[in-house]
Amino acid sequence: MSFDFRFDLLATDGMARAGVFHTPHGPIPTPIYAPVGTQATVKSLTPRQLADVGAILVLANTYHLYLRPGDELIAELGGLHTFMQWPGPMLTDSGGFQVFSLAGKRGQKSLRAIDDDGVTFRSHIDGRRHRFTPERVMEIEQNLGADIAMVLDECAPPDDYEYNTRALRRTHAWAERCQAAHHRPDQALFGIVQGGIFPDLREQSAAFLTQLDFPGYAIGGLSVGETKEQMLETLAFTTPLLPADKPRYLMGVGTPEDLVEGVARGVDIFDCVLPTRVARNGQALLRTGKLNIRNARFAADPAPLDETCQCYTCQHFSRAYLRHLVIAKEMLAATLLSIHNLHVMLTLIKEIRAAILAGRFESYRAAFWEARAH
């Protein structure tokens, strides 16, 4: 079934943009934040809870689902949407970042080896040997059947110019091979711009990939070790190089501050594991920063996490109860804190979009930072 993956740009306010990207499982209003469902689940939440908190787009991880339970099994069971019972739009990454992370830290043995044809790696689960090529990754992602799939790329250390130069050649060659191997007309394949923190390499990458005319473009290789200032500078330089009529996706980035400043630099799509990851560690996201519910001062606190928050958690439970759940290591702690944290992120991005549509994004941005300062 063919599909017209159209991006309608509705409004701009400076570099900030509001639009709609149309997919087979529904429209994606942008800017948008996507909760991360690495293994076909957003940790601690049911799909209904995810919908109730306002999620529209969900991300799943190609590397992890390939290893377990396997992309062929998921295809046999009707694809990722049916498998995890998520009715809305979905995105799968290519697994490139996960393979990159297997390189190992200094003094550790690398679990992967890259060559021009692809990458050989050992599973983090059982150590078995596997091989990803652009063609194999396209087969896996088409089996998974998400609305948006990503090309296989090589994510390089952000400040190593020679490494980034080599990685860019591979990333571009792999993008062409992914495009040639992708035959699913109801799935949008996005290119990924790489090049570390180097403007000339980012410019080369954007020029090469945009002539391939993908339906959308990601900005990869950020939030992988560079400073926040370097990330924002790279974003500000890179997004204007991408087509105005295609969505722009900043991969793996998504603190509240990142959403505001990323949108200010022209980003349309974000994803990040942060809200559910910190929830599992007893942290709540607030408009003014973070709150560690483990602190003893909350042991008898009858107040909600945030008096102004309309989420299920804040409407029903006290800080004292949430702290009790965390200290007792009850599973419900992760669920209730994840509901709150995702509500904060999803409400924030909706407010940002409304501000752009109303032509008042800059005043909203200023108010956001004013609240963070107190």
Image: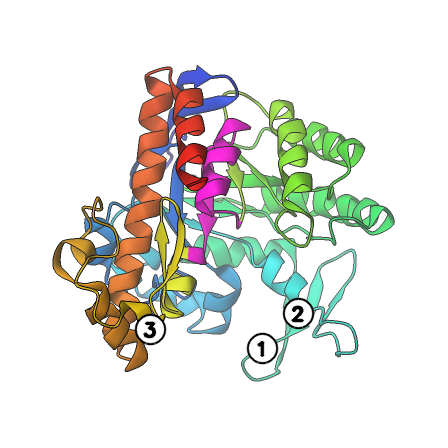
Q: Which residue is mark 2?
A: 102
- Residue type at tag 3: Ala
> Which of pointers 2 and 3 lies earlier in the amino acid sequence?
2
User: What range is drawn magenta here?
Assistant: 252-274
Residue 189 location, x and y as percent? 51, 41
Residue 108 location, x and y as percent? 75, 78
Report the front residue among 168 and 352. 352
- Residue type at tag 2: Leu
The quadrant the N terminus occupies is top left
Q: Is residue 310 a member of the stretch shown in magenta? A: no
Q: Which mark is residue 317?
A: none
**Residue 146 visible:** no
The quadrant the C terminus occupies is top left
Between circles 3 and 1, the one closer to the viewer is 3
Q: Classify residue 240 as left or right of residue 66.
A: right
Q: Residue furthest left?
A: 316
Q: Which mark is residue 124?
A: 1
* Cα distance in 3D space between marks 3 and 1: 37 Å
Q: Is residue 264 a member of the stretch shown in magenta? A: yes
Residue 85 location, x and y as percent? 24, 59
> Which of pointers 2 and 1 lies earlier in the amino acid sequence?
2
Which element is circle 1 on?
Answer: loop
Between circles 2 and 3, the one closer to the viewer is 3
Q: Residues within 10 Å of mark 2 (few under 14, many from 20)?
A: some
> Which of pointers 3 and 1 lies earlier in the amino acid sequence?
1
Q: Is residue 247 above or below residue 130?
A: above
Report the front residue among 370 and 233. 370
